[in-house]
Structure formats: structure tokens, C-alpha cells
Amino acid sequence: MAERPAVPPDAPHHRIPLAHGLVGMVLFVGGGLLLVRAADALARGAWATPAILGAVHAFTLGWLLTLVVGTLYQLGPVALQVTPRAPGIWPWLLPLHTVGVVIVTWGVSVGRHDVAAFGWLLLVISTSASAIVLLGPWRAPEKTRARMRLVTLGFLALGVTLLLAASRLLWGWQGFIPVISSLRLAHIAFGLVGFGTVIAWALGSHVLPMFLGTRAHTSTATRWIPGLLLGGATLLLPTLFSGLAALQAVAVMVMAAGQGLIVWQGLQWFRNRANRALDPALTAVAIAFVALLLATVLQVVLAVGALSGVLWLAHGVWSRSVTIWGVLFLAGWLAMLIAGVLLRVFVFLSWMVRAGPGARPAAHGPVRVSQFSRPSLAWLCVALFAVSLLLLCVTIAAGSASGAQFAAGLYSTAAIVLLLHHALALFAPPRDTVAALPLSSPPLAPSPH
């Protein structure tokens, strides 16, 4: 039997984000399959049905949160210059998190809130432990402290999201009866905007300029982004008991302003990039920014409609518009941004573990990072994501259940192709030929910006 290659000295630091990536992709595939199950509800714009909520939680908790935590294990020492604490408990956190996600997703998708409550408890434990292990702005050096502070604020928004989810457990307790529509809006705002987008900005503003080789520095105007995102979400809290439509509309537009600044900065990065050719990873990131732009425009339209009362009179138009916003923001912006970054980072981490420093040299010479990627599969994955997102929005707007089911099937197929691509990078032999467009910069090197 062939001798196994030596393990790199820092292999545990790479294996942990790899494990998070694989688990996250499996849960992402599960979310895509639940989206197919929910196609009829999508076409009707009934976004609060158990089937759709199950898919949403698979995306947010299974894909977004899992990958964010895994990324922080890698970028913590590199981008934030903070080493995670308590390595002895690292192996226990991902299984606990995974079980919690599966239980919550299953409980929500079948309408069993008692089951979801148990999964919620496991998630609170695992997320709190992960935050203690990974966070702490005071531990970061001065030059990375602001970025670590943003990540910490994002996790605080996640904590508020989990507390809002727990309100179902307290429903009716000593008269606790919030306005259900306001509760859902605040939950979405803190989860997708407060946590997802703040974290995306905190980490994306480090890695995306590096991926693009951009010469554009971050604009001073973007310093308002975290305040606008988190401030808008916080404005929704008083409406939990009063349901003030005007305040809700203002909060939504404040968050839209922060999202607009992210889109504007992303456009500057792409316009000033040194890497003019777009590989699959950068194309996925570009699609994510387009989805965020469309979602932000629709968000403003919905806010103006809520103030004027026009869209409230046409319930079908309103509910389908909200559903399309959710598809663009979650399945488009957040999911595609993570997928694009992962197409670079996962391949690099696979190389680090299998052929990087500390591993036994290959028999036929050194193996390059690009030999672990499969460009044809990556392009197929990105194409399927783009087509399925477009079809989902069109078929939801048209109210076509069969069309929505087909589009959701394409989206889940794209998730499966993404999983296959990364499984081949981690387990299959490296390709003999080097990709035509190799990685132009180390995916995890410190950014000059």
C-alpha cells in the first residue's frame, strides 16, 4: 500500500474550513431540493409557507452561517491576524452546528416548531461557542481591529436574529404578542442584512480587491455601510408591537442605502481591476453584485409602495415581489458571493492539505493550485446559477408553478455541480494539465488595501 503523504504543520487550520465548506455545500444542496419542493408556493408568492421557510433556513444557517464560521477559521490568522482560541473544542463545534441546522430546517419545513426549538437550542450553543473561539476585537492589532469589530457586530446581529426566532417559544407568555409581519421583517433584516451582508462586507472588502487585482482603494463613503445596514435593522425593533408602516419603510430604505454603497464600491473594484478576464469565481461574484443591485432597487420600490399603500391593494403583486426580493437577496447576492469566493478558496485549501508546504512532493514534480480545479465544471455551475436565478424571478412574476419548479431544479443542479467540483478538488488526483487561467494571486494572502 502506498505511503500516505506527510501532513503539513498547519493542516488542522486548513482542514477545519475545508470541513465547513463540504458540510455547507451538502446543506446547500438540501436547500436547493427544498426549493424544488416549494415551487408551487414560490409561484404563488406565499413565501411564509413551511416549505419555503425550510429552504430559507437551509440556505441561511446551513450555507451562509457554516461557510462564514469556516472562513473565519482561515481568514482569522491571515486577514484579521487573530488566532482562534481553544483548539480542543474545534472538532465538536461543526457536528453540533450541523445537527442543529438539520433539526431546525426539518422542523420548520414540516411545521413542527417544538422540533425546531430543540435545533435552535443546539445552534445557540454552537454559535455562541464559535463566537467566543473566533471573535474579540481587542485581540486584533490596530490595523485589523476595525474589520474584526465589523465581524463582531455581524455576529451580534445574528444573536438578535436567534432571539427573534425564539420569540415563537414565548408567544403569548405574559401577554407577549408581537405583530407577526413586523417580527418577520425584523428577523429577515437582522439575518440577511445585519448578519449576512455586514459579514460579507467585512470579509469581502478584504478578499475581493485581491481576487480582482484592483487598483481602486475603498472609498471613504463606504464607512457608512455598517451603520446603515445595522441602523436600518434596529429601526424595525419598535415596530414589533406597534407595526408602524412608515417607520418600517424608512428602515428598509436606510438598509437599501447601505446596500447601494456596496454595489457602488463593487463596481469600482471591477472597473479598475487588473485581471480583465473573468474566471468562474469572479463571474459568480459579478452575478452576486448584479443580484444585490436588483434586490436593492426592488427593496426601494416595496418601501415606497408600503408608504403609498399602492402595493398593499394588490396582494398578489406584493407577495410575489417580496418573494422575488428574497430570491435575489438570498439565493442571488449572498449565496452567489459565497460560491464565487469558495471557487477560489476551497481549491487553494485542497492544494494546501494535499500538496502544499509540508506534504510529500509529488512523484512527477510539484503540483500547482490550478491543477486541483475543474474549469469546465466551474463554468457549468456558474451558468446554471445565472440561468436558474433569472428563470426563478421570471416564473415567480408570471405565477407559473411548473416554471418555478424547473428553475428551482436548475438551481439545485447548480449546487450539486458545485459540490462535485469541490469534492474532486479535495479527493480526486490533480489534473495533468494546468488550467488556462491559473490563479493570478494567492487566494488568502493579506490584501494591500
Image (cartoon, rainbow, N blue to C red):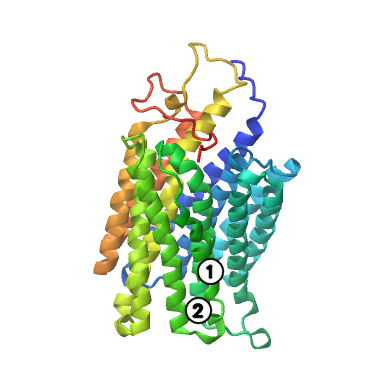
Q: Secondary structure at mark 1?
A: helix
Q: Residue at x 35, y 49 (%)?
A: 267
Q: Secondary structure at mark 2?
A: helix
Q: Residue at x 66, y 61 (%)?
A: 124
Q: Residue at x 50, y 31 (%)?
A: 348
- Image spot of residue 110 (x, y percent): 51, 68
Relative side of 148 to 233, left or right:
right
Work out whether residue 52 or residue 180 is closer to the camera in this orientation and state it.
Answer: 180
Identify the residue under disc 2: 182
Of badges 2 and 1, the one in the foreground is: 1
Q: Is residue 246 above or below residue 136?
A: below
- Image spot of residue 286 (x, y percent): 35, 47
**Kind of residue indicated by mark 2:** Ser
Res 136 seen here: no
Residue, far left: 398
- Image spot of residue 88 (x, y percent): 75, 41
Residue, far front: 220
Residue, far bottom: 175
Identify the residue under disc 1: 231
- Image spot of residue 141 (x, y percent): 67, 43
Work out whether residue 378 or residue 446 is closer to the camera in this orientation and state it.
Answer: 446
